[in-house]
Image: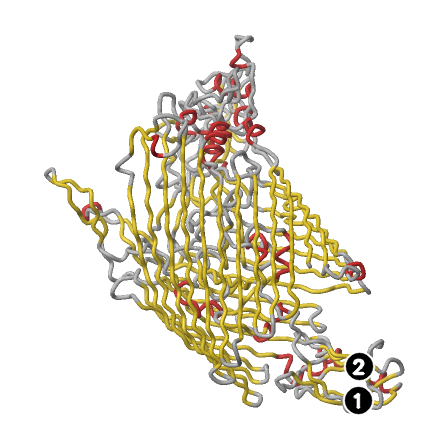
Amino acid sequence: MLKKITMLLAFCCLVGTAGAHGSIRGTVTSEENEPLIGVSVVQLGTNNGTVTDLDGNYQLNLIEGSKTVQFSYTGFATQEVEVGALTVIDVVLGTNAELLDEIVVIGYGTERKRDVLGSIASVDEEAITQTTPVNAFDAIQGRLSGVQISSNGGPGSGSEIRIRGTSTLGGGVDPLYVVDGQQLENIDNLNPNDIASIEVLKDGASAAIYGSKSANGVVIITTKQGTQGKTNLEINHSTGVSQVSSLIPVSNTRQRVLFEQQRSGGVGSGTDTDSLSARFQQEVDIQDLLIRTGVRNQTGLSVSGGGENSRFYWNTGYLSEDGIILNSDYSRINTSLKVDFDFNTFISAGTRINASYEKQGGLNENTVFRQLSERPAYLPVRDGNGELFPEVFGRQNPLAEALETVNDDRNFRSTLFSYVELKLLPELAFRSTLGVNYRQRKRNIFEPTITQRQGNPATGREQQILDYDLQQENYLTYKKKFGNHNLSLLAGMQTQRWNNEFSEIRAVSFASDLIQTFNNVAELNTSATRTLQNRHALLSYFGRMSYNYRGKYLLAGTLRRDGSSRFGDNRKYGNFPSASVGWRISAEPFMEGIRGVVSDLKLRAAYAITGNERIGDYDSQLLYSPGFIYNGVNGVAPTQLSNPDLGWESTEQTNFGLDLELLEGRFTTTLDFYTKTTDDLLYEVPLPEETGFSIVQKNVGSVENKGVELTIGGTPLKLGDFRWYTSFNIATNKNKVLSLADPDGFESGPFKIEVGESLGNIYGFTNLGVFAYDESNAFTDDGTLLTPVFDADGAFTNYTLNGQTYTGEVNQLRAAGRTLGGGDVIWDDLNGDFNIDNTNDRSVIGNGLPKYFGGFFNEFTYRSLSFSFLFDYNFGNDIYRNYDDRRNTATSFGATPHPDRIEGAWLEQGDVVEYPSLDRRRSQNRIGVDSYYLSDADFIKLRNVRLTYELPTNIVNRLNWLSGVSVNLSVNNPITWTNYEGYNPELGSRGSALQPGIDNLRYPNRTEYIFGIKVRL
């Protein structure tokens, strides 16, 4: 194939020579006087062209036509030169400052994208604004391979990000966030309009410079800054309205009555003998009462600019969002200021200040949605006077819960990050930074009388949380070019300190509902009123070396040593090294003939060890606690054993990658293969009761993640003013537990963690259907199900096996101490003893971790108009519908099953149905986690559709005060293709590494319609 392409190019050159009108030659170099390999040299208006060789040299035979030659190269500004009488044309290409995507941010610096050796995914400002995001993660859903993002609830609840799978048991699953150099653990309050780019460091070699906080990946965010020249003013506003995308099935009054008639073993008719009973004449649609049209308003004002030696950017934004469920709302105001100064050629400095205030309205999802799904439809929510109805039949009024419960969460956050940089030598710079992160959070919870059991008073509590941390760094950076050799060195140190203060006051009862502050408290809950304070610190030393020869052979390595106060005396320090190599094949002489097609081809490999230190601040120490009474005297007693050997989770990761660029960047492909193995997993291990303690934190095992990531992007079509850009990404991940402290594993809720299996395994009983007759419960000795035969009068006569009369021994299944009969679940008897029990008859019935996920983006632009859409998808995981299991197997009178459960229940001998009997006395049908409630969680989402119109330049130029105007219409989440019957198949795990894919009912999926406008002055 290579030979054919080379011959074709040679033929084209011969054809061009045949009609030659002179020739030119020369050398193309960068501003650093470095020869550029593979620069495209084209005679404008023709197909005549060539590319530069290894030394940047070229020769082009001109043909009839234009005498203008264009020099273009990825990441550099294109130049056009009039040939005239020239025969030698040497060109110096300058970098293109507008191609921000060609520079990526790495730890403590930047790197040309073409020279990156790790696996780094990035998005720019334009991509971020596509979805009109509320937070940074809304902007990158489906855009980055290997990066999975899911929502955790309604307005203000934030998103969850997973990078290359789950590699911990309990040591924290979130990545590290770095905003303009400041390390943070949460960025939900960051205004997306402030963001210039997001880089996700996925592999260990890219992230290892951050050491013990990088095992789950690193997200680097660069905020916008001012530029030299005119002061710019930008105003943007968007308004969105949203509607619920799907509802869950809820039983109506007739079905509820039918259930009441059947739950004691009857058949039922679904009608009541008292046709005038008010109780059965009304039907309340709780979902309809709780759901509303959501509204979002988002406004921003920014000013930016700069002079010869200074730059500034200031932005203030306001967001107000009323969710699609009553009392779910969120508001936020942000302001940020970023200034940079160049005092002279020796010293520069800068600072970034960000402040935000957030208020999230109170919605107790667990209470509201559970009551919504289980509440009898005939129960009123308001009385004849329009007053909210109190609790009845043990069922709270979900409308009262949504409207009257106060659950306000208010956050004030501020960050300050400043730096001073000294240019000690042209090649050597010293930078010192100081970062302060402050957060004050106040939660007020008030549960009025209407939401309590009848006769109980109102209750409430108030929590205050004060967090602050300090970060100080000092590091040297050395960059030097020696001929064709490029060397970069980094060495530094960092100290970090965290402080957390928590206080809570609780009230057993309030004197009335009228005043919700604590001066109206009738009785305090003194045992639950408490104050806590935690602290921890980290001391680090780090260094990096990177080298390349003519951009062809690349080498890099990092080393970080961290010491944490969280770990035991014997393992306080950990070392986290990395090494990576790269080979730019496209720069080799044998590629010269096809450089016009393959403009860049690079192979890379990396190895690294990263860490995870996210455990409790004092988990390694012997702790004493007050409140223990001995002989009438209050004293302290030990409550936690020490573990001096408690240390880091250590993740060893290898990454092999390929970067391919065709036709001068018109098409790009990135392919990565990775294996990451985490050892010394941090987890709370149970202790024997004889010790007097329940658990101790230990390093207990190992887990592995393997996967492949592929991203393909390009511009398939460019015709005049029309351009089509497309991008597709897919990622796979396979998880496996390699070792545990207990080789038999352990359980966490409905999940089983065991050696040789994946995390996220759902563990339970397999439901094979329902026995139609009492006589259907009949098996041979080897467990084969027999077929009962009945005569014309319905009397049982005999069994058959494979159509033949069976006369052997008949075995019957038992569960919960009872022999199963007609209307009972056929449980899979795994060990063949015909007795269903927890020990022998449970198995892995599903898994909550996806096997494949990714996205597909397209954008079409024509002059001032652009149209784009984004799909994302998720395949290979399951969801356990715990909310359905709970309501379908409940024995209390107040819980109502799923409507299909009622309509399709077994009633009498011979019924061939999907569901077992509703008889509440049959405990054998509710013995544990049931495979029937396992659902396929696959989905494809049309995540966003957007149409944007930019006011043409010729119109804008008529107004001296106006720089640009754009308007857009977009729709978020218009369509979801899925078989999942719950509100949303896209479930976050809410920080739990061990329990992905369990649905207790989350905030519903919603479709949002948005209008936006942006004015630049």
Q: Quadrant of residue 985?
A: top right
Look at label 1 and name its amino acid: Ile
Which one is in front, 131 or 711? 131
Residue 847, position in %: x, y? 48, 47
Residue type at mark 2 is Val
Q: Count residues near mark 2 (Cα–Cα under 10 Å), then give few for <14, some for 14-19, many for 20+.
A: many
**Image side of residue 454 versus residue 145, left or right:** left
Q: Is residue 140 left or right of residue 859?
A: left
Upstream in sequence: badge 2 or badge 1: 1
The residue at which mark 1 appears reads as 24
**In terms of depth relative to the viewer, which is nearer, 255 or 102?**
102
Classify 970 as above or below 88.
above
Q: Is residue 605 visible?
A: yes
Where residue 521 sits, quadrant-wise, is top left
Element type at mark 1: strand
Total numbered badges shown on the rendered structure: 2
Looking at the picture, does residue 729 appear above or below residue 31?
Answer: above
Image coords of residue 870 (percent x, y): 66, 53
Element marked by disc 2: strand
For residue 73, side relative to residue 759 (left or right): right
Residue 334 coordinates in the image, percent (x, y): 53, 52
Q: Quadrant of residue 46?
A: bottom right
Q: Residue at x 68, y 58 (%)?
A: 1016
Q: Is residue 912 visible?
A: no
Spatial CA distance of label 2 from label 1 is 10 Å
Q: Nearer the viewer, residue 166 or 162?
A: 162
Quadrant (top left, top right, bottom left, bottom right) of the C terminus: bottom right
In the displayed structure, does residue 622 sit left or right of residue 831? left
Q: Which mark is residue 69?
A: 2
**Residues at circles 2 and 1 in contact by the CB criterion of under 8 Å:** yes
